[in-house]
Amino acid sequence: MKCNRKSKMIVFFLSIYFVINVCCACSITEKEWTGEHSKIQVAVIAKSTTSAYWKTTFAGASAAGTEYNLDVSFEGPENEEDYETQNQMIRKAVENGVDAIVFSAVDYNANVEAVNEAVSAGVKIVIIDSDVNSDLVSARISTDNYKAGKMVGEAVLSGTEEVLQVGIVNFDEHSENGQQREKGFLDYVEANERVTIVSSVNVNSTIEEAKAATIKMLKEQPQINIIVTFNEWTSLGVGYAVQELDVADKTRVVAFDSNVVSVGMLETGEVDALVVQNPYAMGYLGVEYAWMLLNDDKIRETNIDTTTTLITRDNMYAPENQKVLFSFE
């Protein structure tokens, strides 16, 4: 009788022990599933964080992070020439144990070593916007920059001027996307007898430097009647220069990207056309592709071309173009 009672007590305590352990295991599993530290970590490292373009990129990345329950961070250097800070950010992200990095390279070559080190450490790399000279990245998502440059050429040639005296204001010559845009433009217009390239400069990607370079160019070469430029900051700098010199009536500007100011310049005449990219899609797809890579989902394409639209004063008020210009302001 005593043995039977003792056996029952042992069974009882073993049952309690089992239930407690099962409950703890379930609790831990649920915590691991929903807890912040268990989420896939994706670092978005951009060229900078201050422009409308990059804020829209992060809006897309953040939306994908929410949809796929990821821990998404976003950072970039203070200026779009600082590849050294970008490299430090890559290495710090790897040290912090991120699973993937969505990256836009300041410098096609100078960012290579840090990117390759990250891949060697097991981190997936997805390139957005601006490429890096590495065969180890998993996917590339960006504007077709060469094609976008040709779009600038089409806008230039659409004018009625008999002679097109062109000035080019481009940004950092080590940034692959800017160089591809310029190449696409030059290849498109070079055979046209109306076109003469009068002057071409590269500046740091700031409003101030682009404005100063444009003013200098127009004062030294007053015959210029077309200016082309290839990113948000240089577009604003060119527009401000045209405004300050009061030459909007005789100088046509084909520029890149959009924000409230550049759209205002399109309305008032300092800018005549904007080639508008889709940074929201780049951010969203960059994070989505990172998630797919980390979950072993098959990626059908590793080079994705996001949409680009040419906006002019003639079509800027069309509903579909208003969405392109103001979707995420």
Image: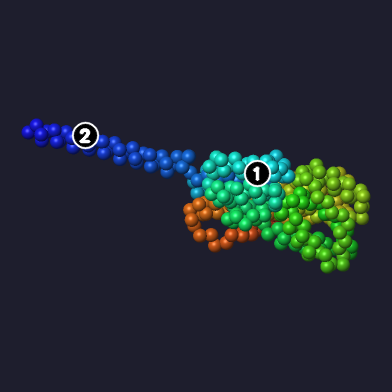
Position of 68 compared to 220: left or right?
left
The quarter of the rendered structure image containing the C terminus is top right
Q: Is residue 146 above or below residue 8?
A: below
Q: Considering the numbered disc 1 on the image, is that residue within a helix, a strand or a loop?
A: helix
Residue receiving disc 2: 13
Q: Position of residue 123 (x, y in %)?
A: 55, 48
Q: Position of residue 314 (x, y in %)?
A: 76, 58
Front residue of 310/293: it is 293
- Taking the spot 70% from the left edge, 39% from the top edge, the residue there is 78
Work out how far the residue at label 1 is from the one at label 2, CA to CA, in angstroms: 58 Å
The quarter of the rendered structure image containing the N terminus is top left
Position of 92 compared to 197: left or right?
left
Q: Considering the numbered disc 2 on the image, is that residue within a helix, a strand or a loop?
A: helix
Front residue of 298/275: it is 298
Amino acid type at mark 2: Phe
- Taking the spot 80% from the left edge, 55% from the top edge, the residue there is 228
- Taking the spot 55% from the left edge, 40% from the top edge, the residue there is 96
Residue receiving disc 1: 87
* Residue 142 visible at all: yes
* Residue 61 visible at all: no
Amino acid type at mark 1: Asn
